[in-house]
Amino acid sequence: MTDLTELTIAQAREKLKAGEIKSTELTEAYLAAIETANAELNAYVKVTSDKALDMAKASDERLAKGEGGALEGIPLGIKDLFGTKGVHTQACSHILNVFEPPYESTVTQNLWNDGAVMLGKLNMDEFAMGSSNETSYYGPVKNPWRSRASNADLVPGGSSGGSASAVSARLCAGATATDTGGSIRQPAAFTGTVGIKPTYGRCSRWGIVAFASSLDQAGPIARDVRDAAIMLKSMASVDDKDTTSVDLPVPDYEAAIGGSVKGMKIGIPKEYRVDNMPEEIEKLWQQGIDWYRDAGAEIVDISLPHTKYALPAYYIVAPAEASSNLARYDGVRYGLREHGKDITGMYENTRASGFGEEVKRRVMIGTYVLSAGYYDAYYLRAQKVRTLIKRDFENVFAQGVDAILTPATPSPAFEIGDKELAADPVKMYLNDIFTVTVNMAGLPGIAVPAGLDNSGLPLGLQLIGKPFDEETLFKTAHVIEQAAGKFSPEKCW
C-alpha cells in the first residue's frame, strides 16, 4: 500500500469511504511523520495527538454507519491564527502566552462539522506579519525543499509558513491559512503547494486573530488544485458573527476542475514586468502563457495602471488596521502580563516584552499614519489609491477577461537569516509585490506550482479572478497543474 501520508485528500477520502483504510490509521501515520520531522522543520507549535485520535475514532464510527461528512476522517493542520476551543491559540506571539480560547473559529468549526481531524497548530509569522516565517516567537519554520547549489536552510515563506511546510513535507493532508497581503500564495509558491486566497467575505473571519480586518481572508494550502477545492468548499460560509461575510451559495468547486478553458480570455498585465525580474520568473510566466494558448485560451495584454502604488498603499492600510486591532493586547484580560509601577507601566512593559520587533515596527507605523495631522496625508490617500486599484481590475474584467495570469513571487525561496533582507525591511516587503493588489481589491487569487528553478526550487504562477468566481480559478489553475506536473521535495529531515 502507498504510504498513507502520500495520499491526497481526494484519494484518502475515497479509501476512507470504501473502508480500505481507517481514519485512526491515517491519523497515526501523520502523527508519526510529525514526530519524525517536526523537530527539524518546526512546522507545528502544538501537536494535539490525543484530540486527533479521539476525532479520528469518531470519524471511523460515522464512516462505518455511512454518515461521513465531506472531509470525514481527513487529518488537517491549523494555522495558529485560528481560534481552537481549549487549544493553544497564540498567533505565535509571546503576548498571547498560554491563551486557550473558550470558543472555536467559524472556519475550523465548519471543518469539524464536515468530519475533519485536527493534528495541531501550525507555526506562522507573529500576528501574520512577515513574508518568511522568521518573526514567530517559536522560531523560524524550515522549508522542506533544498537548493541543489547549497544545503542552506530556506524559508517557507510567510506568514503561513508552517502550513505550507507541513503540507509540502506530508505532515498533514491539508492546512488552513490566512492571506492579508500574500500570506497564502507566497508560501505556497515557495514550497511547491497550492494556495488560494478566496474573495474577501467568502470565509468568515470570526474567531481568527485579526491583523488587518479589511484585508484578512482565510483559505487553504493543499497539495494540488483538487484538494484546495475540497477544503475551500468546507471552509466557506456566511456567518452572522461576521458582517463582512457574504450570503452567497458556496459552489461545488471540485466540479469545475477539468473543464475546458477554450475561448476564455487570460489577461497578462504589463505592469507586472518589474525591473530586475529574474530571467527564470520571466521564462516561467511565458511558459504559462504558452500552456493557455495551447489549451485554446485567448491571451490578452492588459493594463493595471495603479499597480505600482499597491505596495506602498498596502503598507499604510495594513499597519494602520494592525495598530487598532493590536491595541487590545494590554496584559489586563488574558495572555502575558508584565508588572509595572502603575497601570500605564504595566501596559508598556507587557507590550514591550510581548511583541516582537516586526510587530512593534508595524504598530508604530500604523499609529503614526493614523495620528492627527497625518491621517489625511497617509491613511485616507492610501484608501483612495485602493479604490483606484479596485477600479483597474473592474475595467479589465468588464472587457471580458476571465482570469489574470502573473508570477506568484519575484524569486524562489531564500535562505533563513538572509542578511540583506534582515537589514532592510523594505526589501523583505517586496516579496509581496505580486500579491498585495489582490487583497487591496478584495479579489480571489490562487498560486499553483509551475516549475523548478535552475537549482531545483519550486516556482509558482498566480491567477487572479473576478469576485466570488473561485470556480474559474480552480479550472484555470488545473491547466497549469496538468501541464507542469506535481513537485515534491526530497526528504532531507
Image (spheres, rainbow, N blue to C red):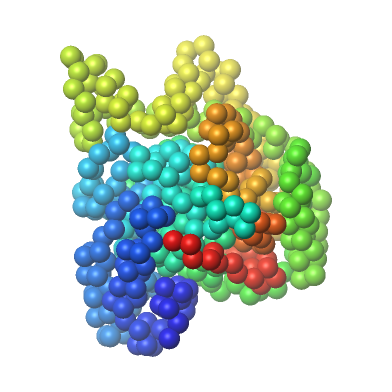
Q: Give the x, y percent position of residue 131.
A: 52, 42
Outermost residue toward the top? Answer: 373
Residue 48 appears left or right of 33: left
Residue in front for this viewpoint, 135 or 300: 135
Name the residue rendered at 35%, 64% in the picture.
Answer: 36
Q: Quadrant of residue 336?
A: top left
Residue 225 appears left or right of 329: right
Residue 345 appears left or right of 116: left
Residue in front for this viewpoint, 328 or 203: 328
Is residue 424 visible from the viewing direction of this image?
A: yes
Q: Quadrant of the C terminus?
A: bottom left
Q: Is residue 68 above or below residue 102?
A: below
Counting labels gives 0
Is residue 253 visible from the viewing direction of this image?
A: no
Q: Give the x, y percent position of residue 477.
A: 64, 64
Q: Give the x, y percent position of residue 386.
A: 61, 34
Q: Give the x, y percent position of residue 132.
A: 50, 43
Q: Is residue 137 above or below residue 316?
A: below
Q: Is residue 394 above or below residue 251?
A: above
Q: Quadrant of the N terminus?
A: bottom left
Residue in front for this viewpoint, 474 or 142: 142
Name the residue rendered at 81%, 51% in the picture.
Answer: 301
Residue 175 appears left or right of 226: left
Name the residue rendered at 35%, 43% in the picture.
Answer: 138
Name the residue rendered at 43%, 78% in the picture.
Answer: 3
Q: Quadrant of residue 352?
A: top left
Q: Is residue 445 above or below residue 273?
A: below
